[in-house]
Amino acid sequence: MQTESTQSRKGQISIHTDNILPIIKKWLYSDHDIFIRELVSNAYDAINKRNTISRRENQTLTVTPKIQITCNEEAKTLTISDNGLGMDADEIEKYINQIAFSGAEEFLKKYEDKEDKQIIGHFGLGFYSAFMVANLVEINTLSFKEGAKAVKWRCEGSTDFEISESERSDVGTDIILHLNEDSLAYLKEDEVTRLVTKYANFLPVEIAVGETVVNNQNPLWVKAPSEVTDEEYKAFYKTLFPTQFSDPLFWIHLNVDYPFNLKGILYFPKLLHELDANKGQIQMYCQQVFVSDSAKEVVPEFLNLLQGAIDCPELPLNVSRSFLQQDPYVQKISKHIVKKVADRLNELFRQNRSEFETYWEDIHPFIKYGMIQHHEFYDKVKDIVMFSSSNGGSTTIPEYLSRNEEKLQKKVLYCSNKDTQSAYVKMCQDQGLEVIYLKSSIDSHFVQFLESKDSDTKYVSVDAAVMDHLLDTEAESSEVVDPETNKSERDALGDYFKEMLKKDKMTVKVESLKSQDLAAVLVQDEYMKRMQDMSVFMKSGNAGLPFGDETLVLNSSHPLIKALQSMAGDADKSEIRGEICQHVYDLARMAHQPLSGMPLTVLDVLRFDRRG
Ligand code: ADP
């Protein structure tokens, strides 16, 4: 039923907020582009509602749903028109005059003291965001209801409004914004097009700016994954990230209807050669309307290097960010995404190992970082973590353990510096022992983390200990004891080294090693060894901590050591003996020079890794 409201009348909105305009400006100023999103979303809702009603009533719509945006430079107006269900005077009264104002007031009360003002971009103050850019807003609308009369409404941003009859004859709504002086940029079609494609590119209704339809309407994520080709995935990646040169490595298509609604595509970008911290970007949509170019609240931090888009129609957008992370629905989504990423990685590993190995170069840092951060992720991917092996090729830890079980039981030998530890690796190889290479600096920390998760498996650096299996236990031990000093030959040689090198604290052992390549090796306590690796990783200034309590193992099977032993007590040879001693130590020491100029952060690690 129509009331007298179709006659020209003036009235006052009954709320306590005296002037909505300054408030809206104050709160929304930083992000005033979003008025486009709000008004276009309202237009889309109106179209949607009209469609739904006509379907329900078995009527066929005679008009093609469309949103038309018109810039009028002369009149300085921007008009957003739709052929949705329109409003009658009662509805304007109810939805525009009352609810919007009181909604704004409620909003202000709720968020007045909050630091997190960015939230406003999420809030959807809706129609009234128009006052961020306009001094005067008009609505010209005709409801689809039979016998409805067209109405005009105008408001200059105060609580005063004016409502009157309109001449309009087609169902739908025009929102006419008389732009303020600061907002004349919105008279340019290019600028409006940019914003429409930012916020409403994937809205499933035609949107024209001037003469041109500007939106795409069909985001790939709404399709069933089985119907999408690789080429389409790659092309869509380019649509989302037009400045991206290389194709993504692989992707995950999220498509859940139950128990929650989540759609989207997450891409693993190619990081090689073009690494930067801002690479990751997951756009967030709510029913195909762009909400934010960060999905921080929904996607766990370690996946922030992924790119793509997710559409969460049920996401509660009108709460603050920190609150959002606590939301059970958000937590469910987040868990689901982690699971999907892990499943996809496992699938790739199983189905195409060699391809997976090539991706590994690019993705390992965030997988490792993710494992450290996320227990469930760790559990799901721990068996597909790859290391390159001294046997050639790559290996996972379970594969390594099963191959080396007999010789090493639950030990994993690793080399953290291929250049300086090559002698140790060779020693192991000579004895048929496999070594894994830790290539990136994050790995030292990662290995420690793996041990904390699975304490049965021990990771041992090749230079951290000369292990039993490197010692030649069958070699004749020459425990000749000097009757004068009551010292064994071995102890005497050890003391001699300490004295010559002026290193009281050093432990010197004489052992016969299986390998005859090395005269001596310096070994270090595993803990000290890791501290040293970590200090390099953290770039603590003194790259490589002081060596700590070192142990020098002299190889009694080596000719140099044999010679040293035979020269004992020969006064003529004391000088040369001293020189050999220093030389043996220097050689052993050389294998322990830490690298300089190592990386700082995970991203530096990545970068470093590429170079390395
Ligand atoms: P919200 O969209 O969050 O409900 P708004 O302030 O944007 O809040 O809009 C208030 C109401 O005004 C809408 O719910 C709708 O009923 C009505 N409305 C706004 N724009 C239109 C439009 N273009 N066509 C029809 N009704 C509209």
Image: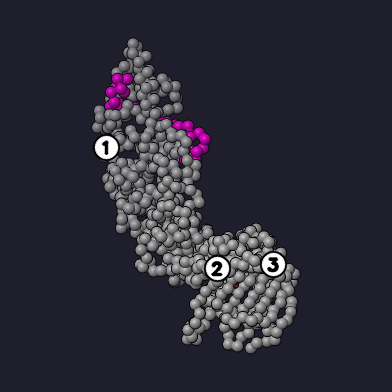
N-terminal-most mark, 2 or 1 = 2
Q: Secondary structure at mark 3?
A: strand
Q: Nearer the viewer, residue 450 or 8?
A: 8
Q: Which residue is mark 1?
A: 431
Q: Locate residue 67, reporting x and y percent.
A: 54, 72
Image disc number at residue 86: none
135 to the left or right of 574:
right
Q: CA distance from mark 3 to mark 2?
A: 23 Å
- Mark 3 / mark 1, whichever is N-terminal: 3
Residue 581 is left or right of residue 545, and the answer is: left
Instruction: Pick the quarter of the image with the N terminus.
Output: bottom right
The reply to whether residue 590 is in sight is yes
Residue 530 coordinates in the image, percent (x, y) = 44, 40
Q: How far, Cα to Cα, is label 3 from label 1?
A: 84 Å
Dots 3, 2 in contact, CB < 8 A: no
Query: Looking at the image, which is closer to me, 513 or 439?
Result: 439
* Residue drawn where x is 39% and y is 25% of the image: 586
Whether the magenta-drawn stretch holds residue 549 is answered as yes
Magenta span includes 274: no
Q: Which residue is mark 3?
A: 135
Quadrant where the C terminus lies? Answer: top left
Magenta segment: 536-564
Among the 4 quarters of the image, the one containing residue 504: top left
Q: Amino acid at mark 2?
A: Gly
Residue of label 2: 210
Residue located at (36% from left, 42% from top):
437
Q: Secondary structure at mark 1?
A: loop
> Ligand 1 quadrant?
bottom right
The mark closer to the camera, 2 or 1, is: 2
Callout 1, which amino acid?
Gln
Does the closest atom of ligand 1 sit within 8 Å of the Cβ of label 1?
no
